[in-house]
Image (cartoon, rainbow, N blue to C red):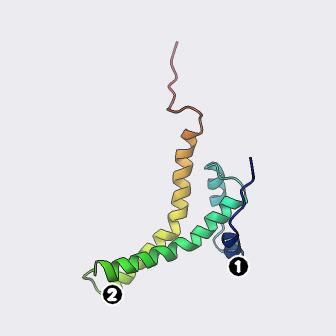
């Protein structure tokens, strides 16, 4: 099997912002390994999306709240919702790795369906 290499723009962004120092987590690396994502490329991808998803979620929330639905709330409430979206966006890669880890264990058994043990 060929070794995966991270996309160059992801690797340069992670290196430029020194994300492995600021948001790098050994626990996240272990979770990725348990989910079947071994090597340096999945970890770089995780760190990249850990940086990008809060920005995307804030932009999406702001456009949705201020432009599309025009929520009838004070601006500070809308800003608070946008900050909550940023917090959620920061944890989305972690939630994805958790979901993949929990669903990956059962799918790697080789059986297309859960096996039952029979007695005698």
Is 33 above or below relative to 41?
A: above
Q: Quadrant of residue 60?
A: bottom left
How crowded pointer 2 is (Cα within 10 Å; few <14, some 14-19, many 20+) is rated as few
Q: Nearer the viewer, mark 2 or mark 1?
A: 1
Residue at the right extreme of this rendering: 2
Q: What residue is rendered at 51% in x and 19% in y?
A: 118
The numbered mark at residue 16 is 1
Image spot of residue 17 (x, y percent):
67, 79
Image spot of residue 108 (x, y percent):
59, 39
Q: What residue is rendered at 50% in x and 32% in y?
A: 114
Image position of 52 (left or right of 42): left
The numbered mark at residue 75 is 2
Q: Earlier in the sequence, mark 2 or mark 1?
A: 1
Along the line of sight, the residue nearer the viewer: 110 or 27: 110
Residue at the left extreme of this rendering: 72
The numbered mark at residue 29 is none
Q: Quadrant of residue 74?
A: bottom left
Image spot of residue 29 (x, y percent):
66, 58
Along the line of sight, the residue nearer the viewer: 41 or 30: 41
The kind of secondary structure element at disc 2 is helix
Q: Are marks 2 and 1 in contact (CB under 8 Å)?
A: no
Image spot of residue 45 (x, y percent):
63, 64
The answer to whether residue 3 is visible is yes
The answer to whether residue 26 is visible is no
Q: What residue is rendered at 72% in x and 75% in y?
A: 15
Residue at the top extreme of this rendering: 120
């Amino acid at each position: 099997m060929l070794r995966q290499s991270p996309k160059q723009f992801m690797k340069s962004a992670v290196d430029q912002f020194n994300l492995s120092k600021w948001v790098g987590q050994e626990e996240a690396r272990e979770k990725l390994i348990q989910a079947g994502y071994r090597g340096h490329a999945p970890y770089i991808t995780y760190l990249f999306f850990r940086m990008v998803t809060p920005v995307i979620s804030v932009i999406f929330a702001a456009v949705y709240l201020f432009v599309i639905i025009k929520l009838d709330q004070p601006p500070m409430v809308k800003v608070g919702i946008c900050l909550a979206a940023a917090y959620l966006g920061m944890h989305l890669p972690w939630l994805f790795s958790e979901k993949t880890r929990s669903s990956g264990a059962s799918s790697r058994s080789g059986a297309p369906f859960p096996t039952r043990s029979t007695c005698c």
